[in-house]
Amino acid sequence: MSRAPRFVGYALMALAAVLAVLMRQGRVDAIGPFPLAAVALLVGMIGVMLVFTDLMVRGLYAQLGAAKAREAATEARQDDER
């Protein structure tokens, strides 16, 4: 499983921070018809969603792997007892 979605999420969050700094300095007011604050919030939210989703899926796979290892150890122990 690739870590690319998480890194894309980090990049989007960094882009949102850069947009917020540009807005704060008054260099950019809007991107097309959209206010810069709205664009920064949307980009940041998508980035956070990608990062957290990747972390949650990796945690789920880790839990499944640990459960399978415990089950295999239990079965091996039961086979040894027989």
Image (cartoon, grey):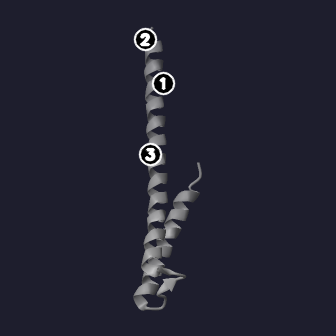
- Contact? badges 3 and 2 (CB < 8 Å): no
Q: Identify residue for label 3.
A: 59
Question: What percent of the width, then of the height, locates residue 81?
Answer: 43, 11
- Contact? badges 2 and 1 (CB < 8 Å): no
In this view, the residue farthest toward the front is: 33
Compute the Cα span from label 2 to label 1.
Answer: 14 Å
Q: Nearer the viewer, residue 45 or 17?
A: 45
Amino acid type shown at disc 3:
Gly
Q: Identify residue for label 2.
A: 81
Question: What percent of the width, then of the height, locates residue 64?
Answer: 46, 36
The nearer-to-camera label among 1 and 3 is 3
Compute the Cα span from label 1 to label 3.
Answer: 20 Å
Residue at the image point whose x is 46% and y is 87% from the top: 29
Nearest to N terminus: mark 3 or mark 2: 3
Quarter of the image that includes the C terminus: top left
The nearer-to-camera label among 3 and 2 is 3
Residue at the image point whose x is 46% and y is 81% from the top: 36
Question: What percent of the width, then of the height, locates residue 78?
Answer: 43, 14
Question: What percent of the width, then of the height, locates residue 20?
Answer: 43, 80
- Residue 72, numbered label: 1
19 to 45, vertically: above or below: below
In this view, the residue farthest toward the left is: 24
- For disc 3, the neighbor class at 10 Å (few under 14, some 14 to 19, many from 20) is few
